[in-house]
Amino acid sequence: MALVPCRECGNEISTEAPSCPRCGVINPVVAEPAGPIEEKQEKEQWKVALGWAIGGFGLLVVFLIWTAISSGRRSRTSASLRTTNSGYMACATEAELERLIKFSAEGDQAAVERAARSSSCTPLRPGLSVYISESSSSGKVCVRPLGQISCVWTLREAID
């Protein structure tokens, strides 16, 4: 015989008492709901299943993004691989290339050579394999030599 609190007044009573001696309520012992352990196990199973579903969905999203990126990369690079022609310069920025074009248009070969030496412009090697990364409406393109990360700006006609 164990002592438990009455469901009405909280007085300590026997689990076998038919009524509470203090408040008189009939069946004062609160019956435990049937199967609290089973309900807890069901909740835990539901949480585990939900966790697996969310994890699986997350992996699916990562896989789809990776597939889209890698397939897009393959289609862009395989379509834009080109080779360079001889006699052209490439610069790290579009502004530096503009400056070389300006000097060349003015016929100032000494200024072209000085600008090429003092800036990050270099001659394009003939037959160099490049990918076209960007292009502008003014006939300039930013190309990335095969095996390099950054692109350089040159004229559109420098590329086959």
Image: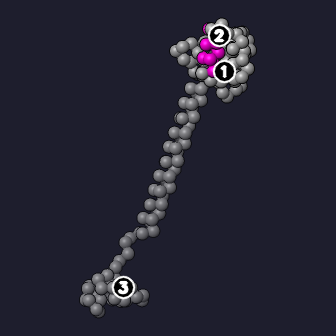
- What amino acid does circle 2 point to? Ser
**Which of the two discs, 3 and 1, sits closer to the camera?**
1
For the magenta stretch, what is the residue range?
A: 96-105
What is the magenta segment's predominant secondary structure? helix
Front-most of residues 7 and 117: 117
Badge 2 vs badge 1, beta-carbon distance below 8 Å: no
Q: Distance between the residues labelled 3 and 2?
A: 99 Å
Q: Which circle's residue, 2 or 1, is located before the other in the chain?
A: 1
Q: Distance between the residues labelled 3 and 1?
A: 87 Å
Name the residue: 62% across, 8% down. 105
**Tag 2 residue:** 104
Name the residue: 40% across, 88% down. 3
Image coordinates of residue 61 in percent, x first then y, are 51, 39
Front-most of residues 98 and 72: 98
Disc 3 crowd rating (10 Å Cα; few below 14, some 14-19, many 20+) is some
Image coordinates of residue 12 in percent, x first then y, are 36, 89
Residue 37's disc number: none
Name the residue: 59% across, 26% down. 73
